[in-house]
Image: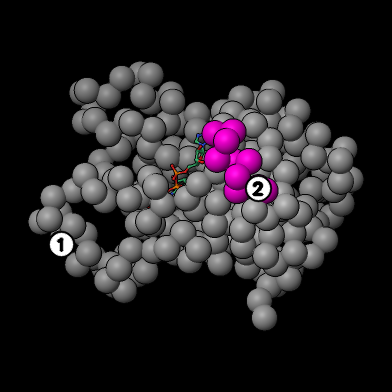
Amino acid sequence: MGVELTGKVAIVTGCAQGIGEAVAKKLAERGATVVGFDKQGELLEKVMSGISGVPMLVDVTDAEADEKAVQEVYKRYGHVDILANVAGGTVGAGRGVEDLTIEDWHRVVALNLHAPFYMARAVAPIMKAQKWGRIIIIGSGAGRSHSRSRIIPYAAAKAGAHGLMRQLAVELAPFNVLCNVVAPGFVLSPLGVEDWARRSEAEKEMEMSTISVKRLADPMEIANVVAFMASEESSYVVGQTIMTDGGHWML
Ligand SMILES: NC(=O)c1ccc[n+]([C@@H]2O[C@H](COP(=O)([O-])OP(=O)(O)OC[C@H]3O[C@@H](n4cnc5c(N)ncnc54)[C@H](O)[C@@H]3O)[C@@H](O)[C@H]2O)c1
């Protein structure tokens, strides 16, 4: 027995693979109707068909497309209860400060900070009117301390996303729209596997020594926390960054 999401309509961004895929599957398993936004059409369709979800091809960095897609979901179901902003990543910006291009900066900030704002802006009036909502942003340990992959715009954008969430939390909590961040450490998603593989054995050993549980996360371990944060049972958790990092933050 776990958290119950029957009757809820959930939008999950970035769910064609990785953590988003796990979140979509977990929310559906708990009874939610899942609408998945992603820019990888084929993979998205495959994931959604496995959970009887609805795929929508959306580039979440496009504010107008986000607004239009959210309105479509609202028209179809008459409510939107859960927004899980999972789409994000470092999108190839792993360079030191002098080599980082302006384009790198804008690309990473657009995906990790602007997109969650566009999405929240689109769902907020719907959730406020129905007096129930959950907005969850997948943040990162990089947003709380620093990026261990040394990706400057990523750390900056995730820190911004954590701040965005806190501000939304204060503004929307009186309407029973609760906002929180779930912040993973190292997760074995396609992005995480690639990132881990780039490291030398010495680096891996050093990183592992700073993770209390001495292993990387399975995406479903992040999804389990998101499902709780999306449920009625998280009704007194507001404006928090839930570190879901195997005790990485502790060491
Ligand atoms: N993997 C980790 O170790 C880790 C650690 C901390 C935080 N995170 C965060 O978790 C989230 C998910 O990461 P992941 O590891 O599953 O990544 P991933 O790269 O495996 O998957 C990201 C998904 O987002 C989609 N996406 C990317 N840009 C998009 C856009 N513009 N519009 C719509 N969809 C888009 C991709 O198509 C993909 O399906 C990200 O926000 C990431 O920053 C991951």
Q: Amino acid at mark 2?
A: Met
Q: Where is residue 178 drawn, in percent x and y?
A: 69, 57
Local crowd size for mark 2, using a 10 Å CA cut-off: few (<14), some (14–19), many (≥20): many
- Tell which of 61 and 114 is nearer to you: 61
Count residues near mark 1 (Cα–Cα under 10 Å), then give few for <14, some for 14-19, many for 20+: few
**Magenta region, main secondary structure:** helix
* Tags 2 and 1 touching, CB below 8 Å: no
State which quarter of the image contains the C terminus: bottom left
**Residue 230 appears anywhere in the view:** no
- Is residue 157 located in the magenta-colored stretch of the structure? no
Query: How far across and how far down the image is residue 98, in percent?
Result: 20, 23
> The residue tagged with tag 1: helix, strand or loop?
helix
Residue that sits furthest to the top in the current view: 102
Residue beneath disc 1? 205
Q: Nearer the viewer, mark 2 or mark 1?
A: 2
Kindly tell me whether residue 175 is visible in this rendering.
yes
Q: Residue furthest bottom?
A: 1
Task: Give the x, y percent position of residue 152.
Answer: 31, 35
Q: Position of residue 181 (x, y in %)?
A: 54, 55
Badge 2 marks a residue whose secondary structure is helix
Q: Which residue does the numbered mark 2 point to in the structure image? A: 48
Which region shows up in magenta?
Answer: 40-49
Looking at the image, which is closer to me, 93 or 133?
Answer: 93
Left or right, 212 with reference to 237: left
Please name the residue shown 84% across and 55% down the image. Answer: 131
Instruction: Determine whether, in the image, residue 245 is placed left or right of residue 6.
Output: left
